[in-house]
Amino acid sequence: MTMSEQDIFEKVRDVLVDALAVDEEEVTPEARLVGDLGAESIDFLDIVFRLEKAFGIKIEQGEIFPANVLDDARYVQDGKVTDDGMAELRKRLPHANLDEFDASRAVDEFSNVFTVSTIAKFVATKLK
């Protein structure tokens, strides 16, 4: 049985409500996990675990939140992601809209890439 985008979104929303102790109405498709919902790095591990359980999928470390790219000197210089770094992020995050981030490339703004919609698209890809 395939799940609709709406079914996936609702299940992702439930996961985020539980993991981040936020109200359901705060979890909109555009809501940013860090900026709007207050997620911290420790929460990302919990979210991955809960998504695996909720959807019966396996998510490899760094697959959904590839922080290791931002820790790599080949991809980051002076706090900005390089062209090679952007190429690597686009390869690893086909489910994310990186256009806005590409404009600034500031490492400390990278967390804004992760919206509820990004997570739902990632899960949809894993379910296929």
Image: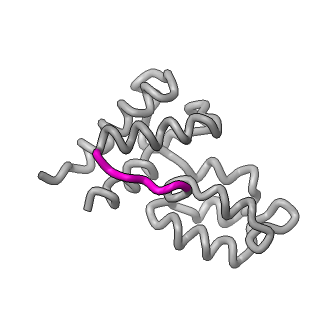
Q: Left or right? Give the position of 7 relative to 97.
A: left
Name which quarter of the figure residue 33 lies in: top right
Name which quarter of the figure residue 15 lies in: top left
Note whether 50 is above or below 92 in the view shown.
above
- Taking the spot 34% from the left edge, 60% from the top edge, the residue there is 125
Place of residue 51 in the rendered image (x, y in percent of width and height, measured from the top left): 38, 42
Q: Left or right? Give the position of 42 relative to 53.
A: right
Q: Residue at the left extreme?
A: 1
- Taking the spot 45% from the left edge, 52% from the top edge, the residue there is 118
Place of residue 99 in the rendered image (x, y in percent of width and height, measured from the top left): 58, 65
Q: Quadrant of the C terminus?
A: bottom left
Note whether 87 is above or below 7 in the view shown.
below
Question: Which region shows up in magenta?
Answer: 56-61
- Taking the spot 27% from the left edge, 56% from the top edge, the residue there is 127
Place of residue 26 in the rendered image (x, y in percent of width and height, measured from the top left): 47, 28
Q: Left or right? Give the position of 58 relative to 37.
A: left
Residue nearer the viewer, 44 or 81: 44
